[in-house]
Amino acid sequence: MTAQREHFFRHLLQGGGPLLIWAVHFFGAYVLVAAACCTAFAQTQWFGVSALRALLWLLSALAASAIGMLMARSLRLPHSLLRSASAGGGVLALLGVAWTTLPMLWALPLCRCPP
């Protein structure tokens, strides 16, 4: 029974891992922007780029690379529903990361709070 349970959770993470990474990225990006928008951190510049913008790009790049690694790993699986779920979930997760990141980057100039 324990071996079956271990296989179930491993397969569940293989198929749904990209979507889980997207969910963590979504939560992290919104918390980052919401918490830092009206603070001095939003005005901080790193090498001529807003620190908030740089962290959002970094978070998105890390999420996209992790999703890409999971998708590449899924291509080594034999043709099965698990492989299709992992690849399809990966594509959906990459689109979700872009869909989450780009509007936030465009809205960051609005992140100016009155004193």
Image: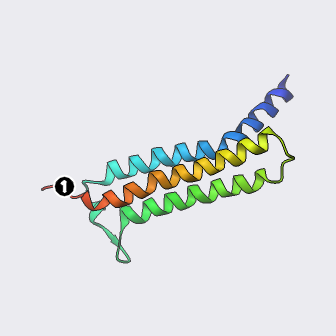
Quadrant of the snapshot with the C terminus? bottom left
Position in image of residue 4 (x %, y %): 84, 27
Residue, x 57% and y 55% (percent of image)?
63
Identify the residue shown where x is 38% and y is 60%: 105
- Residue situated furthest top in the rendering: 1
Q: Indicate left or right for 37 with 61 as reference.
A: left
Please tell me which residue lies in front, 91 or 62. Answer: 91
Q: Position of residue 36 (x, y in %)?
A: 32, 54
Q: Residue furthest bottom?
A: 47
Which residue, given by chain and number where applicable, does mark 1 sit on?
A: 113
Indicate how the structure is coloured in the image. rainbow
In percent of width and height, residue 112 lies at 21, 58
Instruction: Give, as a three-letter code, the residue at label 1.
Output: Cys
Q: Residues within 10 Å of mark 1 (few under 14, many from 20)?
A: few
Query: Going by the image, does 23 lie left or right of 3?
Result: left
Left or right of residue 44: residue 112:
left
Q: Secondary structure at mark 1?
A: loop
Above or below: residue 73 compared with residue 80 = below
User: Residue drawn at (70%, 57%), measured in percent from left and top?
Assistant: 69
Residue 90 in the image: x percent, y percent?
65, 49
* Residue 76 drawn above or below residue 45: above
